[in-house]
Structures are given as structure tokens and as C-alpha cells.
Amino acid sequence: MSLSRPVEFPLLKLPWLCIKTMFSSSIQNFFRIYFATISNRTRRIVKISNYPLQKVDVAQHRISRRIFMGKDKTWYFSQDQFEFGVPLVLNRNSEPFLTSSSLEGDSLRSYTAGDTPDALKMGIDFMIDVFRCSIRLLFFDGDKLSELSGLGITSVRELFIFDDKPVNITDLKYLLETMKVIDRYAFYVPIPANFSCDPQIFTHRRLSFMSNHSADWVTLDLLCQLDVSVLNVRYERFSKEDIVSYVTHWFNSENRKLEYAQFDFNNPVSQEHFEIEHLNPMPFDEKRRNRCSFVRWEGTDMSSGMDILRKDGLLATFYVESTSIIFHVWHKRFPDPVQQ
């Protein structure tokens, strides 16, 4: 089977409207992908069938490479050989991948005898070409960052990096400088304290340091330079005094992008642990703002938090909840009338 020699397929004798209707319906992913590999003509049919697959997620870990096409719809690329399957030729003149499907036909598993990352790249290129989709989420192990450039991915919506061991700072710096991340950076990996990069990379994005030592390289000075929309810092990276300095910097700035910053501590803290009197804090007033956030923590009553009013009229709340500090900026103080 090859792209240059299409097989006989009775489906192609149907009227075009029937074919398009069938491929726009709930046909199995395996058959849709298999059909697109039969010939150039079948590939074009799938491309113009307008199947609503706008975004896919990609994961490259030590033991698996995957493309996520939706809930319970995954394409695995593995060097674990199996006996039965269908050979898929994704690109002209490329070696076929022996591929099997789940009972429902929505998940696929391809055997790659050679370079698994290269096989993942062919799968990504195939999905982008045939379904005209983009990469939404990218999940990568820290020790696999050097392989990322070989995948040809230049833009993603959200980037997640995982590992228990410290990441290579050269690989990380190159990735951050070359990869366009539209919405969020999430680090679940230790990053050495001697790492550095231009903080402008994270401008107007969400930034999360989710594991121990992932924010070791972020100094107080750098923290205050981060012009992000959302900031999450776990595992008590910053002291109480550092957090007050960060809030004070926001108070004296013209930053109108920040939505909230959350800092976690290892042990419970209270409002009295933070000296913010110089910011003229005010107790909650229901005429000034809503009790709960509209961005996150919709069910959390923040009326115990202290409000801070900046000279430009922007209001923020310094709220303490058990082991977390939430600094929430009220870009919208009350719900819209249509939402009430």
C-alpha cells in the first residue's frame, strides 16, 4: 500500500456529498486516519471534509510519545512491537507504521522500529496537514528538551515541562527563546538557581512554578519584573517579606495586566504575618467589590481579605487562606447585570 498506488475503494464511487457527510459525522478516528493514507485523493477528501479537530495536544516522555485528539482519543508511538495491525504510510516514500486501534476505533498505537521522536514528528505533521489543526498543549520531560527542536513545533498555547531531576539550563534557555507560547508556561521541574532568561518572554502570559525548586532561579528583583497575567508559586519559594515587597511594587506601578498571584507556604499563615499597613489596607465593603472572584475560586469568600486601592482606581485584595496567599486584582468588581 502506498500513496502512489491507491487501492480499490468502493466508497470513492459514492457522490461527493455522501462522502463528505460521512466524514463529518462520528466515524472512527482510526478509519479516518487510515483512509487519508490510501492515496493523494483520499487525503484530499479528508482534508476538505471539515472534521472539527482544531487543536491537538502532544506529549513526549521517557516511555511514550502521544498525540491527544480529544477525550479518550490518543495516538501512541511506541517501540513495543505487536503482531497485528494495519500499515500506515503517513508520507510519500516513508516506511509504514504497523498500527492497531482500540475496540472503539478512537485510539491508535503505532509501532516504530526506528527513531520514535521522528515518528512522532511525522504524526504531528500528518495531523496538521490533513486536519489543519494547531498544537494546544505540549507536555515534555525535562531531559527530552533537546529533542523538541526536531519536532518542528514553533508555537503552542500552553507548555508543560516535567521532571524530578534539574533541567539542562542550555536546553531550557534555547526552548524559551525559540518557542512561541501563547498563554501559559508551567514548570513541574527543578530549575537550577544559576539559570537566567529575559523576563519579557513571559509578558502577558500565565506563569506557574509547580514543583519544589522550579522557581529557585527567580529572585525578588526578577519577580517584580514579571509582567504576567497570572502567577503561581508553590513550595514556599519566597518569604513573607518578599511577598509584601512584590505587592508594594504592584501598588506603585502601572501594571494593569495582573489578574492574580498565588504564593503557597509549607505551613499555615495568617493575615497578621504580613506588614501591609503602608498600603492603606481596607476591610471588605460589599459596596466596593464582590465577595468572590470571577477569575478563579468562584466559591471562595474573600470578604476576610484586605483591600488595597491604587491611585489609578484599580482595586486588589490581599487574601490569606490556610497555606496560601492570594493577591487578587479586581478588573471587574461586580458581576455583569446579564449574569445576575
Image (cartoon, rainbow, N blue to C red):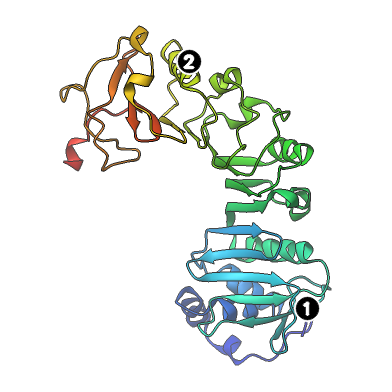
* Residue for badge 2: 245
Q: Which mark is residue 305?
A: none
Between 156 and 9, the residue placed more toward the observer is 156
> Height in image: 336 above or below 16?
above
Res. 18 in view: yes
Q: Is residue 296 left or right of residue 1?
A: left
> Height in image: 333 above or below 97?
above
Between 224 and 36, the residue placed more toward the observer is 224
In x, y percent, where is residue 34? 64, 80
Kindly report the distance in space between the C-alpha atoms of the residues bearing marks 2 and 1: 59 Å
> Height in image: 310 above or below 288?
above
In x, y percent, where is residue 96? 78, 78
Question: Dividing the image into 4 quarters, which one contains the C terminus?
Answer: top left
SS label for mark 2: helix
In x, y percent, where is residue 89? 75, 76
Count of all numbered marks drawn on residues in the image = 2
Res. 36 in view: no
In x, y percent, where is residue 93? 84, 73
Q: Amino acid at mark 2?
A: Ser
* Residue for badge 1: 96
Please, which residue is most extreme toward the front here? 267
